[in-house]
Amino acid sequence: MYRYDEFDATIVRERVEQFRGQVTRRLAGELTEDQFRPLRLKNGLYLQLHAYMLRIAVPYGVLNSKQMRKLAHIARRYDRGFGHFTTRQNIQFNWPQLGDVPDILQHLAEVEMHAIQTSGNCIRNVTADQFAGVAADEIEDPRIWAEIVRQWSTFHPEFSYLPRKFKIAVTGAPDDRAAVRVHDIGLRIVQNEAGETGFEVWVGGGLGRTPIIGVAIRKFLPKEHLLSYLEAILRTYNLLGRRDNIYKARIKILVQATGGEKFGQMVEEEWEKIKDGPLHLPQAEIDRIHRYFAPPAYEALPDVDPAFETAKLENPDFARWARVNLVKHKVPGYAIVNASLKPEGGAPGDASADQMDLLADLADKFSLGEVRVTHHQNIVFPNVRKRDLFALWQRLKSARLATSNLGFISDIIACPGLDYCNLANARSIPVAQRLSRHFSDPRKLDEIGDLRLNISGCINACGHHHVGHIGILGVDKQGQEFYQVTVGGSSKDDASLGKIVGAAFSEDDIVPAIDTIINTYLANRTDRSERFLDYVRRAGVDPFKEALYGPAPARRTAAE
Amino acid sequence: MALLQHGALQPNNWRFVGDDAAIPAEGPVTVSLKRWQAESEVLRGRNAPIGVRLKNDEPALALGEDVHRLSLIEVEFPKFTDGRAFSQARILRDKLGYEGELRAVGTILRDQYLFMTRCGIDSVELPEGKAIDGYLAALKEFSAWYQPASDGRPTVMELRHPANANARRGAAPIVTASVAAHSA
Ligand code: SF4
């Protein structure tokens, strides 16, 4: 993984001191809360319902064991023993004291971490495919480019006061695991006819109040021009993005209002003027960063490991986990392991300090010292020898980290919701917990198959409900928590937005409603090969409406 | 209002003249872009320095070659959170090659001052008597820069790869003597 050189280290160290000064000024009353707000937000510090929340950047989701141990330490010392992994591959702590934050940042700087630009109207932490560098289907490693973008976007003097937040995602594989089409900018590494690799550039996607799938404004961008192209997009947005209405300030609104094609032309025009200037990426820098991501020294192993095969035969639980939570590695004899942070009845994405320490130990022992955070709020061990899988599974199981539910209905994405967030309409975590209990039987999970269920506590959509196969959105009905349900969303290469099934459900009715939706699907699918998403795309929302609210004529009467 | 320039608080002898007001016979003034475009002949005929105050939503490029006839361009920061003028400043410096004084007016907190200088702004308007220690300290809060901007400071990438940097600097932004002095 990337390691800081003297320059990176200097910048992060200076940032800690700068923020320490800002906190001191705030505590001394030299800064009003209004003036402090944009400053603290640029450093991931929110004022929530009960306390401050600090969001720490995990650049493109990559963590080494030392960093994970440091997070465990912070959870113990400055929080209540927990951390919360987010859909943007970051980690949040919900209980730090303002006066402690500079010290926390100091701890982080010691392990080459920070909270820079994890919130505020600036370019946020860049996200990438969690299987970068190890996935069998990868064209090229996106981490190199994510790191280059991270550096360019850090303290960008021109783009630190944008109309609104700005999120960039990079993927290097045809199977889009970074949801690039629902980002402000999505970069897909593609190959052209000449066999060269470059970027397909998507702009103007996003969730939130107005969910929109982005548009591809460039089919192929030579890699050395990445930064000048990004700068052209950002400059266009900074000058023309709306600032009069916070709900219309994201780049997606500008792109829609201008038209994708026209917006693309404006960007190209700007880019032509700057592409050969100092933002042109020197090959030496690409090579330098590339070296940090060189493949580790893998052992030459047979792809079939007899011990692994035997263990599966002898232990059905293990076999099931291996079937569900492993992903194909590009190197024979190795596997990519997903450790689920969605145990039955758990809060999605939460990890205790002890679990973090264990994850760090297991990374050292079994995965060349590295883990990844996924935007599905799970943890990945990218490099595990097949022969070690059984031992790893046993250790994970002992810490409730071996739930076999990757990609199933209980692998829920949920935002913090009303338990923590002051923007929320409704709680997300308790709904996720109840659903994960309701859908805990492994046979039932297998029966339902591939299903993504996402929950957001309000229209800001931090839980990505629009792109869940089933989405749940917290709404407020006369002061009561209600839940609106959508079906048919996807964040993958076939990205689509879910459609609302009908009137929202109360807290008591939401789990039965989801159950009805699942049963409707199970009763009507052609066969197991028709996934939930396929079924929704074929049959539409009507069968669900009928099952949930009664036959159409009756519904009409009721509405009158 | 006073001016923070060259590391000290200075008196400000410029004044902005609204579109409806008469242009005074003497003294340096700034006018709106609209007025400049309509009356540039007359304005240039005056025997005093002339400048333009760009609104936040006006395209800096509209000034074109005119920038070389101006002694001052002002860009606005109406709210701390409105960052359009950062881009306007860079366009004036990098695209139009403006080398005169580039001034920030509006709400200017010390925490933005460094970024302003990086974007080529070399003076900022502050209330009379404002303590400037914080502003000066803010300029020293960082010592390394990832991005090329309009201040000519060498970037981290250039320091990492000196040979390549020299080749590219041909196309580099224009660094005005004033910005260079300011950021030294
Ligand atoms: S979706 Fe709403 S409730 Fe959930 S974290 Fe985001 S802002 Fe808070």
Image (cartoon, helix red, strand yellow):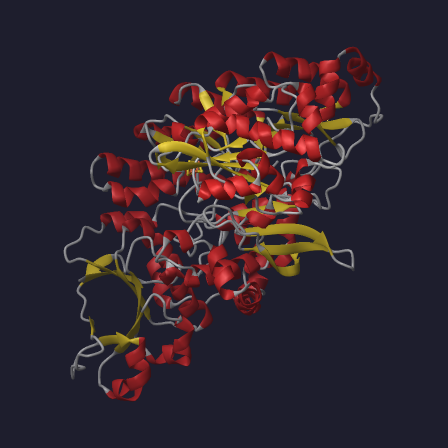
Q: Quadrant of residue A310?
A: top right
| Residue B9 locus on image (x, y percent) | 20, 58
Kindly identify the residue that appears in the image at 45 percent across and 53 percent down: A250
Quarter of the render that holds ligand 1: top left
Q: A371 and A346: which one is in front?
A: A346
**Is residue A437 among what the camera can see?**
yes
Give residue A292's position: percent from left, percent from top: 64, 39
Task: Assign the C terminus of chain A to one quadrant of the image.
Answer: top left
Q: Is residue A483 positioned above or below A364 on the image?
A: below
Q: Quadrant of residue A277?
A: bottom right
**Image height of A12 relative to A386, above or below:** below
Note whether A288 is above or below A192 in the view shown: above
Q: Is residue A488 visible?
A: no
Q: Quadrant of the N terminus of chain A?
A: top right
Rendering coords of residue A218 (x, y %): 63, 61
The foreground one among A303 and B168 is: A303
Q: How far across and down, in percent of the image, does residue A228 sit?
A: 55, 60
